Amino acid sequence: MAKHTQVILIDDLDGGEANETVTFALDGKSYEIDLSDGNAKKLREALSPFVGGARHAEAAPARGRRRGAAGGAQRAMTREKSAEIRAWAKAHGHPVSERGRIAASIVEAYDAAH
């Protein structure tokens, strides 16, 4: 059996037919709104002076993704760097295992000392 699914966008402002979904962000939150061509134009015109004076920002980390206190540095650490940090930690009385992940607090202490 064949199926045909049709998606009809409804303008979130006036309830008429929408032609596009406009995505924007403000105060660290992303928004989507379905708009007709006319309302999309009005939104872009209203934001134009602000967009013109703004600078591009880096995208925020994806939601749900956990990042350690080291900000991902653990994944990028080489074996040599790991060995260096372990040796420094032992020499300075920090408890550190021979293998596995190095605690973020030890990495931070190492970075602060260097």
Image (spheres, grey):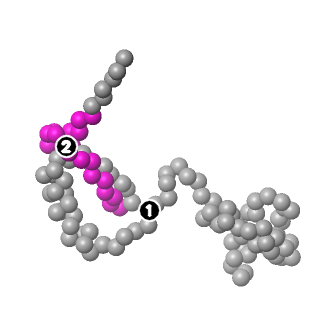
Element type at mark 1:
loop
Tell me what residue is drawn at x 14 percent, y 39 percent: 16
According to the picture, the residue beneath numbered tag 2 turns out to be 18
Q: Is residue 74 left or right of residue 26?
A: right
Which mark is drawn over residue 14? none
Which percent across, then down, holds residue 42? 15, 57
Residues in magenta? 7-27
Residue type (three-letter) at the residue carrying disc 1? Ala
Pick the residue in front: 66 or 20.
20
Alpha-carbon neighbours of circle 1 within 10 Å: few (<14), some, or many (≥20)?
few
Q: Main secondary structure of the magenta part?
A: loop
SS at mark 2 in the image: loop
- Quadrant that contains the N terminus: top left
Mark number displayed over residue 59: 1
Spot the residue most to the top. Answer: 1
Cβ–Cβ under 8 Å for marks 2 and 1: no
- The residue at the point 27 percent across, 31 percent down is 6
Three-letter amino acid code at disc 2? Ala
Q: Quadrant of the C terminus?
A: bottom right
- Foreground mark, 2 or 1? 2
Question: Label 2 to label 1, Cα distance in Å?
Answer: 27 Å
- Above or below 83: residue 20: above
Q: Residue at x 30, y 72 (%)?
A: 54
Vertical arrangement, residue 53 with respect to residue 18, above or below: below
Does residue 88 appear anywhere in the picture? yes
Answer with left or right where residue 1 lies relative to residue 53. Answer: right
Residue at 14% from the left image edge and 43% from the top image edge: 14
Q: Quadrant of residue 98?
A: bottom right
